[in-house]
Amino acid sequence: MTLITHAFDALAKSEKEAFGAPDHPVLVVQHPIGTVKVDEVNKRADAAFAKLVDILLEPQARRAATGS
Amino acid sequence: MPEQALQAERFEIPDDIWAAQAFFDEKGWSDGLPIIPPTEERVAQMLAATKRKPQDVIGAVPPRWAQATVEKIAINGVMAGCKPEYMPVLIAATEALADPKLNLYALQATTGGPAIMIIINGPIRQAINVNGGPNALGEGWRANATIGRFVRLMQRNVGGSYPGTTCKATLGWPGKYSICVGENEEASPWEPLHVERGFNADQSTVTAISADASIRASDLDSTKAVGILTNFVQRMDGPSGPEAIMVICPEHARIIAGDGFSKKDVQKFVWERAAYRMKDLPDETFAQRVKRRSDLNLTRASIIPVTDNPEDILVVVAGGDGSQSQYIHVWGQSTPEGGSTRSVTKLIRD
């Protein structure tokens, strides 16, 4: 699976199509990361973690999280 | 050229040039400037200027990873305004774009927004009138303007690089429209770039490199190499990428070489002085640097050279009269593995 920020959503979609892998799971988190405080990054990581586990374990949950 | 050999989709376009441009805009084929309609006749003229077959694949262009055939190169060459005799240069430039070492995917996807700078060496410069003299990085020469533009159109029309979606440049810079220069080999006291890289002087090459906006390294006062290079170093202080580009004007080059400096001496002198000092960094930035380059065991006392190695600094002679050189920062991360992008040089063939 791939983890990106939402700023790169369209690019990720393009890549999935280019490589013929439209169902490749992508987890999208809020942009930016580089210029926010560590506490906020940790909050986003905590929020994303459950989705990450779902994506890795449950194909149905994966589809729900990525909208694919 | 048999028509059936060409596979691109055909479109009927309006005769009126403005209506035609509106059609191209609607299709998203332009960089914002008007383009030359790639009619069958014009594309055939381009294809007649190469021995390569129209469906020969030169490489894949990201982010769409579409195949860059010779036909597509010819089409985008016409659109950019290239003359047919540029065709071998366009093919070599496309080979460079598709080389994994350049890592074009990262260059077009990054928020950093670098251009792909094209440096042309060898006798082809005279054959197609590539400028390496006065205003070498500026306007006024069709070969420079349109070959550089071709590179951008290939990224857009073959690679699918569109600002805001698949091209993530925060700002970009005008070099993204076109940046192509010939090395002024005749005015250089040193061996040209392509010879440094193992080619013969009578061969012609295209070098592609990640390039951010340049910084003028003006020096009208120094009469000695050390003075010119020290002034240059002051423009280069700070973090660069895996490589850096010194575009040295002929007047500066003559003085530097006259004091006995070879190209390697120039690289060594600059590399030993152009540095990124950890003591100057804010705490957060320093902490990130330490994480990113854990292999370097950085401390507040550390001084990081502008590039990992002296030979990573490209020394290119270009320009006309005047004491105005330029430093061009290379986008990319310096990494333990050798960097997130490296310049590539390709032989221009018929």
Image: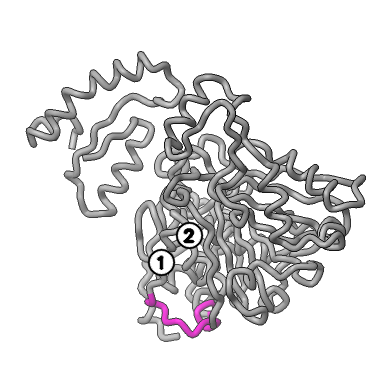
**Marks 1 and 2 share the same chain:** yes
Mark 2 chain: B
Type of residue at label 2? Met
Structural crowding at the residue carrying mark 2, measured as other residues with C-alpha within 10 Å and reported as few (<14), some (14–19) or many (≥20):
many
Residue depicted at 30% across the width and 27% down the height: A29
Most extreme residue toward the top is: A39
The answer to which of B93 and B187 lies nearer the viewer is B187
- Report in which chain the residue with disc 1 lies: B
Q: Is mark 2 on a helix, strand or loop?
A: helix
Across and down, in percent, residue B165 comes to 40, 40
Q: Where is residue A3 shown, x and y percent of the image?
A: 27, 35
- Give the labeled residue for mark 1: B68
> According to the image, label 2 marks what residue?
B154
Q: Residue A10 carries which label?
A: none
Tell me the residue at 36%/13% (across/down): A39
Residue at image position (13%, 35%) is A56
Q: Is residue B239 visible?
A: yes
